Amino acid sequence: MYKPNINTIKISENDQSRSNFIRSFVQSTPSSFMSIPESINTIPKTIVQFWDDTDNLPWDVKECIDSWNYFEDKGYEQILFNEYTARQFITEKFTIEHVEAFKRCYHPAMKSDYFRLCFILSKGGLYVDVDDTYNGFNIEHLFEDNRLKLQPLCYDIETDMMIEPDIFMNPINYSSKWIFYFNNNPLMASSGNPVIEYALQRATKILLETDPNDFPEIQSTTGPGNLTASIVVNMGDSKLFKKDNNFLILSDWETYAQTIWNLSYRQDSRNWRLSNQKEFSQKIKPSDEGRS
């Protein structure tokens, strides 16, 4: 189990310090942080996704998933997991503590967050959310080296809006109201990546130490906040960073895939934003069964 130093943990667990750290990282000259690994190991040609209840897969979500079928003819494996098969995978590849942590993920989005860490750590590949549709631009080059590939994000607290990458990536642009972090979608790495390892370790610890009757905040427990904390911890450990952590910042991910926001499930409790820190109760809408 990876044990980071105390100072990096303190930075990673403080919202403002973490944001400042990520800002410095993403706005730095790329060549100073992102080097090609000395040993070129490719990322497995696997595209993995998760929908908790595949027996009730909304047609519009299925359309997003099917957009990735393009890669099957190019030798890629596309796998859609559900709650049962994800739990089975975790049972086979990890410990009883990880299985229990997965069970304590009270919302499908949380299960998705936790499972992707398990899968990518164990197998490597590309995890993509089921509400992302493939745009048709070539992504095969992203599999050609083992760098961890992540999408940077920036949220403006004052306007309650996301900032475009071409603005927040430029070091001349800054506001104290901006929060810098990394998305956990897409999540792309080779197996055994230390950033993924610590993110899983951290999420597991929080889930197991939280009262089973409580509902921890999703984003910071298993989602982007958790992954960002792990990035800060790993980058703060200079020895580990120089040895293993090679990043490619996907500031142009929306060129390759587009998040579809007007999906049917976003109108009910399956939308994590409507269910955060609440008991999850799923009610399937008739419109999920097919086009209305």
Image (tube, rainbow, N blue to C red):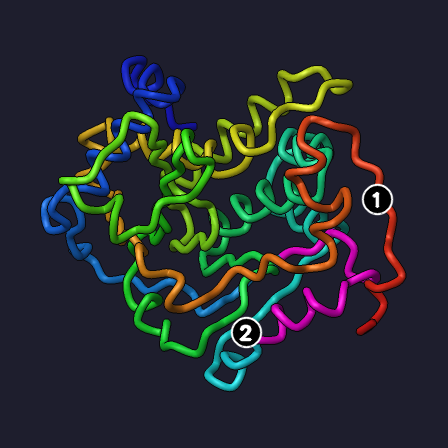
Q: In which quarter of the image is residue 290?
A: bottom right
Question: On the picture, is 187 further left or further right than 140?
Answer: right
Which residue was labeled with disc 1?
A: 282
- Which mark is drawn over residue 68? 2
Q: In which quarter of the image is the C terminus?
A: bottom right
Secondary structure under tag 2 reads helix
Give coordinates of residue 69: x percent, y percent. 57, 78
Tell me which residue sits at (54%, 33%) in the image.
Answer: 219
Question: On the picture, is 117 further left or further right than 140?
Answer: right
Query: Which residues are drawn in magenta?
Result: 50-67
Tell me which residue sits at (25%, 29%) in the image.
Answer: 21
Tell me which residue sits at (79%, 35%) in the image.
Answer: 280
Give coordinates of residue 47: x percent, y percent. 52, 66
Whichever of callouts 1 and 2 sits on the residue coming sooner in the sequence is 2
Whether pointer 1 and pointer 2 mark residues with C-beta atoms closer than 8 Å, the reply is: no
Residue 278 or residue 90, whichever sits in front: 278
Secondary structure under tag 1 reads loop
Give coordinates of residue 191: x percent, y percent. 42, 52
Residue 269 or residue 198, whichever sits in front: 269
Question: On the picture, is 40 further left or further right than 28?
Answer: right
Disc 2 marks which amino acid? Trp
